[in-house]
Image: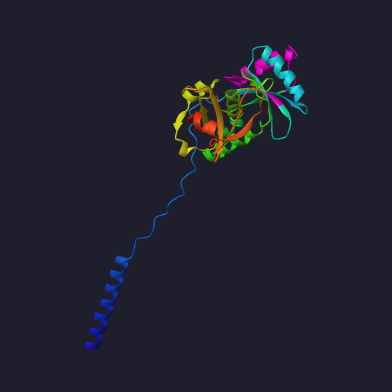
Amino acid sequence: MAVKDRTLRLSALAAGIIVFAAGCAAPPTPFRSEPSAVRPRPALPSLRFTIQVGAFLQIDNAVRLTERLLAERLSAYHFIDESGFYKVRIGNFPSREAAVSEAGRLQRRRLIEDYFIIAPEDYPLGREGGATEEQFRAEIVRTAKRFIGVPYRWGGDSTVTGFDCSGLTRVVYGLNGLELPRTSGEQWRAGRPRERRALAHGDLVFFATKGGSRVSHVGIYLGGEDFLHAPRPGSRIRVDSLGDDFYRRTFVGARTYL
């Protein structure tokens, strides 16, 4: 009987130790899902429906078409896409029907032939799932680099006459579905302030190249100290450094649109 009682006491003691140990153990770590990728919240209106025409091997053909469209007081520019073909985009229409109607009018006037409608879902931010902010910024930079070597002439937002500095930024953002205002001053006011130490590729950097503090020049930040811009009449779109003395002295600030 004594042996049985001692066995029971030992069993109870063991059970207590097990319960105590279980109570002191750390609770199981709850499952935590990975944070979702950051999606951009643009500070700019998104482009709607745009007419795209042409698939030219020679840039001169795209230039001639763009000139005719500009003469009709249409918003038009040409560009080179990843395939190496030159194409032209026309307008920003509120609906597919409106874009198709205008394309039909241009066909009847024999200004264009076949066309394609670029819809909101064709841009990076409108695709299924949408681009992350990092992906969108990378696309801005990649698009901008296609225009390196295009001649700069003040006042043009078409490569017919070259890009002025704000025309370059406007077209690059437009090819990615966001509508920047026309001038560098308007672009400065449309963006969100960005500290220089917090710059991210695809942000715009602004300068007062004519003295004072009034914005007169803009470029696209590429990372590090590099930015891409259309420097001055007679030169070509190129990459320069924010650390260069002139740009360091004339730097006004930066803006982000995402």
Toward which corner of the image does residue 8 lie, by quadrant?
bottom left
Provide residue 43's location: percent of width, then percent of height: 48, 28
* In the foreground, 35 or 150: 150
Provide residue 172's location: percent of width, then percent of height: 60, 29
Q: Would residue 200 be visible to someone looking at this image?
A: yes
Which residue range is magenta in the image? Answer: 87-114
Question: Is residue 92 one of those drawn in magenta?
Answer: yes
Question: Is residue 9 one of those drawn in magenta?
Answer: no
Provide residue 52's location: percent of width, then percent of height: 68, 24
Picture mark count:
0
**Is residue 18 rendered to the left or right of residue 86?**
left
Quarter of the rendering occupied by the N terminus? bottom left
Provide residue 198's location: percent of width, then percent of height: 46, 39
Q: How is the image coloured?
A: rainbow
Q: Would residue 256 be visible to someone looking at this image?
A: no
**What residue is drawn where x is 54% and y is 20%?**
183
